Image: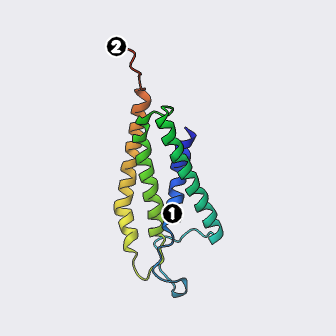
Amino acid sequence: MPAAAGLVLALPVATWWLVGDQSTTSASEDPDFAFRPLDVSRGVERVAGRASALLAAVMLLLLVWFTVRHLFDARWWSVLVPLMAAGFITGAGWRVMTAGVIGANIGAGFVVMVGGPLIAALLVWAVARSIYLVRHPHRLATGSPN
């Protein structure tokens, strides 16, 4: 479903934008970086952030509406929620990992040690659950055993 794909793709960018720069020092102080942030202008950052936040919100509302109207199988939320959590961790984690600091970026190490395995586990769950849902389609109660 395109709405689910839009939500999963937009959420990390929206989170990244909403979290914002986590640097603890100014650029004039020659900060250290675990990873250098993407070189994008504030204007591009704002447009990408606002567009992805709007897209994520609209797609989420659309999926909820489709679920309520029984146009979207509610069992697929067990795939979407872990993917959304992984996207949130990715967006927020990227901001932490690209923060300018003086000395070691302890937060970046935490993101790698905890966030990385957590994202991997969430993605494995989502793939395994997707395979299960595809192989076991939802059967409506018809009164027959098949």
Rendered position, 121 above or below 131: below
The residues bearing labels 2 and 1 have C-alpha atoms spaced at a distance of 49 Å
Q: Which amino acid does label 1 sit on?
A: Trp
Which residue in the protein does label 1 denote? 16
Instruction: Name the residue furthest top.
Output: 144
Residue 82 visible in rendering:
yes
Q: In this view, does 33 lie to the left or right of 6?
A: left
Nearer to the camera, 108 or 138: 138
Quadrant of the rendered structure where residue 105 is? bottom left
Q: What residue type is labelled 2?
A: Pro
Q: Earlier in the sequence, mark 2 or mark 1?
A: 1
In what element is the residue under mark 2?
A: loop
Residue 41 visible in rendering:
no
Where residue 90 appears, x then y in whole percent?
46, 58
Rendered position, 43 above or below 72: below
Residue appearing at x 51%, y 65% in the figure = 18
Residue appearing at x 43%, y 53% in the figure = 86
Which residue in the protein does label 2 denote? 145
Mark linked to residue 143: none
Rendered position, 21 above or below 64: below
Quadrant of the rendered structure where residue 109 is? bottom left
Where residue 96 appears, x then y in whole percent?
44, 69
Residue appearing at x 39%, y 37% in the figure = 129
Where residue 30 appears, x then y in whole percent?
52, 85
